[in-house]
């Protein structure tokens, strides 16, 4: 059963994520958004991130690609699941947009 109050849109947009910290430490995580809705999105990430972590997410897809309505966003990791991709291990994550004030 769908838990969202709005429909998901399937997209593929390259992203770069970094943990929100007072002192940046240069630990960027590459990935791609797979689908999005008004409340958040699902992404495939190259590194694990603990649920509850706040990420700064930047869309870096090629010009003309279908990008989400926000090109930079703050999002909270809600869940994470490891997914084997050949010899690599990727992680599918559910992220919820944080409201701006």
Image (cartoon, grey):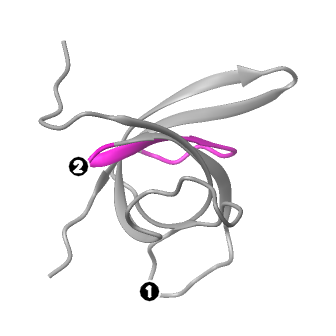
Secondary structure at numbered mark 1? loop
Quarter of the image for residue 35 reads top left
Identify the residue at image location x=39%, y=69%.
Answer: 73
Residue found at the far bottom of this picture: 23
Q: Measured along the vertical axis of the image, is residue 28 above or below residue 52?
A: below
Residue found at the far top of this picture: 1
Quarter of the image for residue 100 reads bottom left
Quadrant holding the C terminus = bottom left
Residue found at the far right of this picture: 87
Q: Is 58 left or right of 72, judged from the image as shown?
A: right
Residue nearer the viewer, 70 or 16: 70
Identify the residue at image location x=18%, y=12%.
Answer: 1
Residue 48 within the segment the image draws in magenta:
yes
Identify the residue at image location x=57%, y=83%.
Answer: 24
Residue nearer the viewer, 4 or 88: 4
Q: Residues within 10 Å of mark 2 (few under 14, many from 20)?
A: some
Residue 59 lies, in percent from the top left, at 56, 64
Residue 29 within the segment the image draws in magenta:
no
Marks 2, 1: nearer the viewer? 2
Residue 23 lies, in percent from the top left, at 52, 87
Gap between marks 2 and 1 measured at Cα: 25 Å
The residue that disc 1 covers is 22
All told, the count of numbered labels is 2
| Mark sitting on residue 39 | 2
Q: Residues within 10 Å of mark 1 (few under 14, many from 20)?
A: few
Residue nearer the viewer, 50 or 100: 100
Residue 53 lies, in percent from the top left, at 39, 56
Identify the mark nearer the N-term, 2 or 1: 1
Residue numbers of the magenta segment: 37-50
Q: Is 79 left or right of 3, judged from the image as shown?
A: right
């Amino acid at each position: 059963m769908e838990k969202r109050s709005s429909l998901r849109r399937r997209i593929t947009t390259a992203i770069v994520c970094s943990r929100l910290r007072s002192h940046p430490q240069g630990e960027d995580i590459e990935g791609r958004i797979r689908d999005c809705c008004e409340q958040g999105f699902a992404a495939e990430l190259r590194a694990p991130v603990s649920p509850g972590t706040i990420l700064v997410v930047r869309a870096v897809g090629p010009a003309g690609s279908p990008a989400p309505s926000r090109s930079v966003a703050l999002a909270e990791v809600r869940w994470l699941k490891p997914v084997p991709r050949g010899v690599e291990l990727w992680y599918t994550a559910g992220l919820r947009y944080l409201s701006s004030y």
